[in-house]
Image (cartoon, helix red, strand yellow):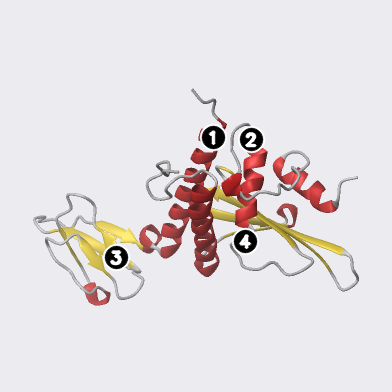
Amino acid sequence: MPTLMQQAMGLLVGEQPIKPQSTTPKQRSLNKLTERQLIKLESEIGRTIFGEIPKGRTREFFCLDADTWVWHETWKDENNKEQERTVRYEIHSNGILKIENNGKNCNMLKGEELMNLTLAARMYHEKVLREIYKRDPHSGKLLNS
Amino acid sequence: MAIYLPSGSRGRLEQPQWATQSSTTEKKVTFTQRPIEFEVIPVDSQTTSHETYRSAEVSADTMSAKLFVRLTSDINACRQSELSPKA
């Protein structure tokens, strides 16, 4: 039976999440990977951008598609009850929309929060292009192996 | 913070008290604080017509959002190139 995390990830990326792989992104061949598997690889990097993950927590942070980014965290509260938080960031013509609580809370990002998200996206871009796609983040050209 | 006047612009800045430089030839203007509003007035214009740029066009938020969009586009382009059939 899928865990809550698996169900949540299934909702976010379409189906059940792929099984974690034991090798680092640098060692993997990207041949034959599906889009979902590439997103999962990216999230392995994305989750590290915000620092150490406290024990007992899981975190995912990834670019879902050309218009959407996702932050997802799970943890157990003081009653040992599973908690989760999902934030979606959507690109709109007038800015970045932050969506929480299944759409109940929506607001356009601005100020420090927007700058912080952009900084995170910049780090994600830098690391994902270099480590997964083997490309120079500035020129987009393939790196020499 | 710096902004660049539109290409081909021959203008000067009005009320440049918050700008560190203002010139009829330099197209780069550096601000000592976030600009609220400024005007570019063609120097050879005999009329009062001018272009007005408001903070929304040059704000840090706008620049952040544009960068975010560009980064997202880059990442997706790389991903799609991996998914596309290899020749």
| Mark nearer the N terminus (2 vs 4) | 2
Please give the residue where the numbered disc 4 appears in the rendered image: A48
- Report, in whole angstroms, how far the alpha carbon at label 2 lies from the one at label 4: 22 Å
B50 vs A79, nearest the viewer: A79
SS label for mark 4: loop
- In the rendered view, does A12 fall on the left or right side of B83? right
Q: Nearer the viewer, mark 4 or mark 3?
A: 4
- Report, in whole angstroms, how far the alpha carbon at label 3 lies from the one at label 1: 37 Å
Output the chain of dot 2.
A
Residue under the point 74% across and 42% down = A18
Residue A11 on image: x %, y %: 76, 44
Type of amino acid at the residue the image marks with label 1? Glu
Indicate the quadrant where residue B28 lies.
Answer: bottom left
| Mark nearer the N terminus (3 vs 1) | 3
Say which mark, if any, is on residue B2: 3
Residue under the point 53% across and 41% down = B76
Type of amino acid at the residue the image marks with label 2? Leu
Q: Residues within 10 Å of mark 3 (few under 14, many from 20)?
A: some
Kindly indicate whether the residue at mark 2 contacts the one at mark 1 (C-beta within 8 angstroms): yes
Please give the residue where the numbered disc 2 appears in the rendered image: A33
Are marks 3 and 1 in one subunit?
Answer: yes
In the rendered view, would you say B37 is above or below A141? below
- Report, in whole angstroms, how far the alpha carbon at label 2 lies from the one at label 3: 43 Å
In the rendered view, would you say B16 is above or below B64? below
SS label for mark 3: strand
A22 vs B44, nearest the viewer: A22
Kindly indicate whether the residue at mark 1 contacts the one at mark 4 (C-beta within 8 angstroms): no
- Report, in whole angstroms, how far the alpha carbon at label 4 lies from the one at label 3: 33 Å
